[in-house]
Amino acid sequence: MARLLRPLLRGTTYTRLLHLWVPMLFVSVWLFIDMSKPWVPAALLVPVGLIPAVRRGEGVQARHMLARDSEDTAISVTPSATWRDRGRTVLWLEARMALGAAACVLTVWAPMTTVDVLRAAWGPVDGPIVSVAAPHWAYALLAPLPLLVLYGGVVGLGELTTAVARRLLGPSPAERLTALEERTEQLLERTRIARELHDSIGHALTVAVVQAGAARAAGDPAFTDRALGAIEDTGRAALEDLERVLAVLREPGRPASGRPTLTEAGRLLDSARASGAEVDAEMTGPLDSVPGPVSREGYRILQESLTNVLRHAGGVPVRVRIAVDGGSLGLEVRSPLRGDVPGPGRGSGLRGIRERAALLGGRARTGPDEGDWQVRVDLPLR
C-alpha cells in the first residue's frame, strides 16, 4: 500500500501535472474568444516551434518540472540548430497540448463523477456522466473508482509526458557528438595527469625508499650522506613536477575547437624527421573539410602512431598515408617491424588509438603486416 501511494508524496508528480496544465491556460483564453475554432491554438504552435529559442525554453521547463529529482541530461537546453530540431520542437508542443488536454479532462471530470456517484446514493442525479433516477446506497461504494482513475491517469500522463520530452527534446546527433567529444577530452586529460603523477611521484617515492633502505643497511656515514643527498634531489624534482601538474589542473580548459587538427599534421611529420625518422608522407583529399571532432582525433592518432615508432623503432623509414575519400577518412602509418610484438592487452598507446576510433564509430587495425608494423584507421566523416 505504501508503495502504491508513494507517487503522491513526490513533488515531481504535481510539477508534471502543472506542466501539463500551463498550455491549457492559453487554450481556455482562446475558447472564450472563439469557441467555434478550437484548433487555432494548435495551429499557432507550428510557427512558434520554429523559433530556435523555444526549444531552450521548453527544455528548461521539462528539466525542472518533469525531471526535477535529477539533472536529466537526456533533455537538451540548447536552441534549435537544424530544421530537424525545429520539427521535433513543433511535435513536442503539439504533444504537450494533447497530453495537457487529457490531463485537464481527467482532473475536472473525475472529481465531478465522484460527487455525482455520492449524490446518487441519496437522490436522483442527471449529470453528463452519471444519470440515476432511483437512488441506492450501494452507489456510494463506487465513489473511489473515479479517484483511482484520476490517480492512475495523473501519474501515467506524467510518466508519458517525461518520456515524450526525452524523445523529442533530447540531444540531436550533433549535440551528442559534442558531448562525447567533451567527455573524451576529459578522460584523455585525466589519463595524461595520471601518467604525469605516476611517472614523477612514483619514481621519486621508489628512489627514496630504495636509497633509505640501502643507507640503513650499509651503516656507512659517507654512503648515508650520499643517499640523503639523492633523496633530497629526487624529492625536490618531484615537488617541481607536482607543482607543474597542479598548474595544469588549475588553468581553465582549452575548448575542443582550439586543439590541433589534421591540417596541422605537417608539424608532426617535421618533428618525426627531426628525431631521425625518414618520413614518406602522402595526403590526398580536402583535409580542411573533415569535421572538427574527426580531424582532431585523427591528429591525435597520427601523433600517437609516430610516437610509438620513435619510441620502439627509432629512426627508421616511416610511410604515412592520409586520404579523405567520400564519406571516410583513412589514415595509415607503416614502419619496419623491430623488437617484440605487443601481446593482447599490452600497449596503452595502441589501446588509445582503438578507443579513439571506436568513439567516432570507426575501426582501427594495428599489428604486423608483411614485415612492417602497421596502424590503419578508418573514420566516418558523419
Image (spheres, rainbow, N blue to C red):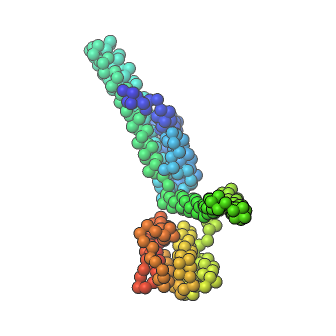
Q: Nearer the viewer, residue 367 or 203?
A: 203
Q: Position of residue 113 (x, y in %)?
A: 36, 24
In the orientation shown, which residue stands out farthest toward the front? 219
| Residue 358 in view in this figure | yes
Rendered location of residue 81, percent (x, y): 55, 59
Would residue 361 be seen by someone viewing this image from the given angle? no
Q: Is residue 239 above or below residue 260?
A: above
Q: Give residue 110's quadrant in the image.
A: top left
Please state if 214 lies on the left or on the right of 229 as rendered: left
Is 35 situated left or right of 201 in this image?
A: left
From the top left corner, tell me how far across and down residue 128 is, in percent.
35, 26
Callout count:
0
Residue drawn 64% across the image and 62% down it = 218
**In terms of depth relative to the viewer, which is nearer, 7 or 15?**
7
User: Could you say where residue 228 lies in the image, as x and y percent from the top left?
Assistant: 71, 61
Q: Quadrant of the N terminus?
A: top left
Question: Relative to 214, does residue 33 appear above or below in the rendering?
Answer: above
For this rendering, which residue is in front, 272 or 12? 272
Residue closest to the eye, 206 or 165: 206
What residue is drawn where x is 53% and y is 47%? 59
